[in-house]
Image (cartoon, rainbow, N blue to C red):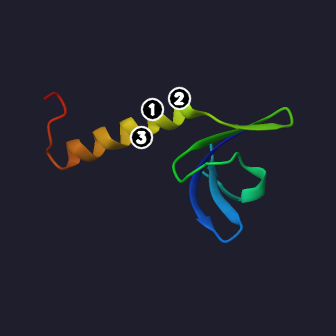
Amino acid sequence: MRYIIDRFEGAFAVCEDESGAFRNIEKSKLPKGIRSGDVVVFEEGSVFADRAASDKRRTEIIALQNSLWGRRTDK
């Protein structure tokens, strides 16, 4: 299962799954250095950050913001 870290509240990370549902996951169960916006994968008993997916999401969000604000990205 893949989750996107939405935010942190106390000892929990509020995470959104692929269907758009939210779930609280204890911070202690997440990889060190994880931050809001990161993609985390729970798979066969292990947990890891998907850095490539996290970077792709950030790039897409920045491009969307720039298009909404009328900024050119091809400079």
Q: Residue at x 16, y 27 (%)?
A: 74
Q: Are marks 1 and 3 in contact (CB under 8 Å)?
A: yes
- Residue 20 lies, with reference to residue 40, above or below; the image says below
N-terminal of the pair, mark 2 or mark 3, is 2
Question: Crowdedness of circle 1 by 10 Å Cα count: few (<14), some, many (20+)?
Answer: few
Looking at the rendered image, the quarter that the N terminus falls into is top right
- Number of disc labels: 3
Q: Which mark identifies residue 56?
A: 1
Q: Are marks 2 and 1 in contact (CB under 8 Å)?
A: yes
Where does the image place residue 44, in percent across and percent down from the top left? Answer: 85, 32
Where residue 47 sits, quadrant-wise, is top right
Looking at the rendered image, the quarter that the C terminus falls into is top left
Q: Which mark identifies residue 67?
A: none
Element under label 1? helix
Element under label 2? helix
Where does the image place residue 6, in percent across and percent down from the top left? Answer: 55, 56
| Residue 62 in sight from this viewpoint | yes
Q: Are marks 2 and 3 in contact (CB under 8 Å)?
A: no
Element under label 3? helix
Question: Crowdedness of circle 3 by 10 Å Cα count: few (<14), some, many (20+)?
Answer: some
User: Which residue is the site of mark 3?
Assistant: 58
- Residue 9 lies, with reference to residue 42, above or below; the image says below
Where does the image place residue 52, in percent across and percent down from the top left? Answer: 53, 29
- Does residue 35 appear left or right of residue 62 in this picture? right
Q: Which mark identifies residue 52?
A: 2
At label 2, which amino acid type do we have?
Ala
At label 1, which amino acid type do we have?
Lys
